[in-house]
Image (cartoon, coloured by chain):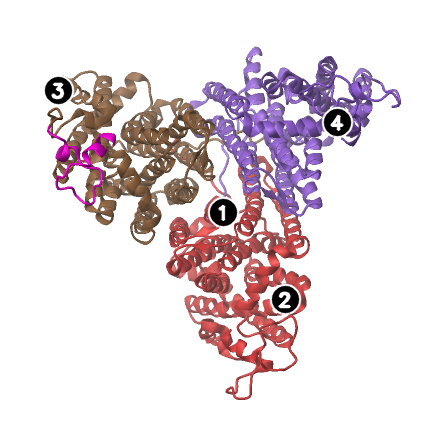
Chain colours: A red, B purple, C brown
Amino acid sequence: MARNRVNQTSDGPEPVDAPPATPEAHRPPIDPPRLSWFDPREFGWEGYLLPAIPIAIAASWFGASPVVRFLAAGVAIIPLAGVMGRATEQLAHRLGPGIGGLLNATFGNAAELILALFALSRGLDDVVKASLTGSVIGNLLLVLGASLFAGGLKFPIQKFNRTAAGAGSTLMVLATVGLIVPALFHNLVPEGRGLEHRVSVAVCVLLVFTYILSLIFSLVTHRDLISGMKEEVAAIISEATWGLRHATLFLLVATIFVAWMSEILVGAVESTGDELGLNPVFMGVFLVAIVGNAAEHSTAVVMARKNQMDLAVGIALGSALQVALFVAPVLVFASYLRETPMDLLFSTLEVISVILAVIVARMVAEDGESNWLEGAMLLMVYAILGVAFFYLPGKAEQGGEPQPAAQAPAR
Amino acid sequence: MARNRVNQTSDGPEPVDAPPATPEAHRPPIDPPRLSWFDPREFGWEGYLLPAIPIAIAASWFGASPVVRFLAAGVAIIPLAGVMGRATEQLAHRLGPGIGGLLNATFGNAAELILALFALSRGLDDVVKASLTGSVIGNLLLVLGASLFAGGLKFPIQKFNRTAAGAGSTLMVLATVGLIVPALFHNLVPEGRGLEHRVSVAVCVLLVFTYILSLIFSLVTHRDLISGMKEEVAAIISEATWGLRHATLFLLVATIFVAWMSEILVGAVESTGDELGLNPVFMGVFLVAIVGNAAEHSTAVVMARKNQMDLAVGIALGSALQVALFVAPVLVFASYLRETPMDLLFSTLEVISVILAVIVARMVAEDGESNWLEGAMLLMVYAILGVAFFYLPGKAEQGGEPQPAAQAPAR
Amino acid sequence: MARNRVNQTSDGPEPVDAPPATPEAHRPPIDPPRLSWFDPREFGWEGYLLPAIPIAIAASWFGASPVVRFLAAGVAIIPLAGVMGRATEQLAHRLGPGIGGLLNATFGNAAELILALFALSRGLDDVVKASLTGSVIGNLLLVLGASLFAGGLKFPIQKFNRTAAGAGSTLMVLATVGLIVPALFHNLVPEGRGLEHRVSVAVCVLLVFTYILSLIFSLVTHRDLISGMKEEVAAIISEATWGLRHATLFLLVATIFVAWMSEILVGAVESTGDELGLNPVFMGVFLVAIVGNAAEHSTAVVMARKNQMDLAVGIALGSALQVALFVAPVLVFASYLRETPMDLLFSTLEVISVILAVIVARMVAEDGESNWLEGAMLLMVYAILGVAFFYLPGKAEQGGEPQPAAQAPAR
């Protein structure tokens, strides 16, 4: 930012809608020459993970052990997802609040969507649903928790806009209702087996419709409430502002590589689980989801350390919402291109994890204040859920039809 | 209201406790003559539904198809319930806050109670419980949602008293605890079958006791908190103020007709379900309950469009509370006049719907602010629950003893 | 207090950290001589229960009926737990906020812990878990409810610090997540039987870790937030301030007697249940837990009657938290000294009771205001849960492996 402010004095043709001058355009000649189209510094710390891309490709070509392929591809996706997110934001910024907001809302979690689509095409429905679950609880507990904790270690009490956090978490509750109804229906109506697909599709239509309403709310009718915040994000996030062509190209290239890495990762997920003794649901909820959300994670923590809690909370809640209201329905709709479609039937442990995450996150967020203990509490709930998922028996996934489960001793 | 303000100049004997002059008493002689005891204009838009009464009676006499009888009787109950509600309020207004409040609290949902009593006497316990569930979730999601949505389309942000809304929704949570404990007990204690009736009765006694405490709170110890609001309602609702005799007669006549229509509707509910392919629980939760609550619905939406959010929220929460704390226990007690009493054992889908409705409504209400998106969210949750109830298999109601239900795949 | 203020004029060696002069040290010579080491007046009303100690001992020696032994020992524990609590506070006060806070945090619920340890050593795991459940719901519903009700009868509206209450109740939610995960795991993962112990231990480690973090928060990083309150408690509670030796001796003696009484009570609990026709879970949740919490109960109510709502709410929430985050894990760890360890597998009714108690208590506490109706609501929820536990079939405890439970009619 300081660098940019120095550049303000330059008299180049400055775009009106991008107050922080773009370094490419206005850099004074004294500056050292830079790799104009590709500068690792633009990636922040994530840039150091880029070498994982060739490693993953090589591992895949030479048939390395699945663990190596899984890890390399997973690590490679982290900076690529970051680039996709940043390129989307840059494009959104330049296309103005209307189309830009729409773009951001649609491609914001594109890396996760691509990853899930590859898993879907391989029939790994359990992993797809687990990564959706993991993305929601990861954003609400891990990303939000780490942000509040990291920020709370620096500032005794941090404040944020409770109205915005409240609206986000109420929408999250609605999404949760949608996500649990198919599982509820399946469990409570044994005679209704086979109708879950119809229930899932009807719910997905309602979720997407709600997503559209929430976009109308934030982009049209109540734009003023949100826009101040959007500006701030743009100002803080984009230390290097990219041009329109630059951003489009980066988005395209990163998308292609994310798809490639996702294919490698998804191809190795089952064998990796077998080799490490981890069940595929644990891998989906904790490993795959963390890979997909690493970019949000690092941005939210950086914002919290700068005491920009509105942004940190907004990133975590917004990403969880987008997964529940947009990515999940899109995956269900996409599954109708397969022979057998996917339903939204999450396992009871997943359902309850999402409910608990939403409740705890809302409780922490609703007073508009945070401290490090609240962050630690979110992380602790994440760890407790991790324990439960870790001890799930690995073979359970094969069992097609669940057995009648016994209740706890009623005493 | 404007009409009334003109009449204020008249010097007739104005009752002190009814500031907006009653049109009957003070109308200047120039006015066109009016049908003094029965004026359809007093019914608002609901007046246009009154012709459904003779249609329902004719359909019942000439043995028309059950769908026709069900629809005609259902449509006829809507204006009658409105008249009963208005007559009760007028009487309450004239009898003063003490006895009047008690009257309002007892007869406020009388139409619903009469309808449920007829279903109870026919042994349609499923429909009775479904209409109780439907009344609670209908008030919390449909009535409140439509009010916030309709009001929010006119005003960007609407405010209401969060203390009152909070107290109401906390009472609602207590009522929910009462409503779910018998079902819990039934599910968790297989050895305890047969004890549900004792648990139900004990819970009903506690619910009625809580209702009495809440009346003492609002009518005696904390009257000031609520009374300002009550006055406002009276001033806004009663465009035409009725005399004591007028109101009593209207209450009596409307009650008789509601009973008649209820008998026709309840007699046709099962055959209608069969003919339309709708299961009786869906009909109870969505159709019967909407009929019983139509009056509250229309009043709450009108209040919201006038930005009187305290009233709109108060009507929705108050009606849901009255059903859970008063109507439900009265029905259980009344069922002891039959050979086999009714328990409070709701199905798990009903229990979870009520829990979700209470949680979502509270979340939306607790910040004391609303916008159209919050209203849309409540309506969307109502729609999602509607999908689940719609796909319930119709024959499930016959199955006396439920089979052991399988849990979701635990994975 | 008034008495102390008179004594302030005396010129004895007054300890700097104990502003209210200790009556022993500064009583003017004119005063009547007092039993310097043991004065029943120091016990308040609980002093009148002290004769239960010899009765319990005699009943135990002469082999009286189990009901007599149970009642006498239970009544005897009430004043002893009060003495332990007061002695701990006095020591904490003298040892300064750091070590003192730690002492208070560790021994605050020592009487309950001792009682549970005796039940644990007898293999009465059901009673141990029931008393943990009972302690949590007793503090959140009975103690908090009675305080708000008793205080609300005197003051129309009472206010308290909503930030502190919010933090406490959020921690309580985290603790609840921990307490329910083993039961969830057991119910949802039939193939995972036998892993519950590992899950329980992992969860216990996380709970204790959270407890340590919460101590660091309240004793180190955010001491200022809490310390003002601590001072107030000390000033109000300790009408008679004890010396260091005095307090240590009292703590030791009371602990020994609590252990003795606990042994008698635990030895009689099963036969008492059989004789009174009460199931052991009801006895654990309602009778044993009330005995262990009687001291907190009486202090919280006294504070509420003095309009010191921060203290009343703090005592109830703090005690519930200590049980969930510290006593429960310590009991699980202690059970590893037995041949077969105890797990944290609560019955579903217990799990749901704790969830409901936490939700209702948080709803009542979150607005920072209370009135008698809110207190009555908490008591009513306690009563409704009491009904459910009361009707549990007594023999259910023997049934080792639970049968597959049927769901509610799905309709």
Disc nearest the viewer among 4 and 3? 4
Callout 1, which amino acid? Glu
Pinpoint the chain carrying mark 3.
C
Mark 3: give few (<14), some (14-19) or many (20+) Cα within 10 Å.
few
| Span of residues in magenta | C1-29
Separation (CA) of disc 2 from disc 3 = 83 Å
Residue bearing the label numbered 3: C61
User: In the image, residue A153 lies at what x, y percent?
Assistant: 37, 59
User: In the image, residue B178 lies at what x, y percent?
Assistant: 49, 27
Q: Nearer the viewer, residue C106 or B64?
A: C106
Res A218 visible: yes
At 69% from the left and 28% from the top, the residue drawn is B235
Identify the secondary structure beneath mark 3.
helix
Pinpoint the chain carrying mark 2.
A
Identify the secondary structure beneath mark 4.
loop
Pinpoint the chain carrying mark 4.
B
Residue bearing the label numbered 4: B239
Q: Is residue C178 above or below residue A1?
A: above
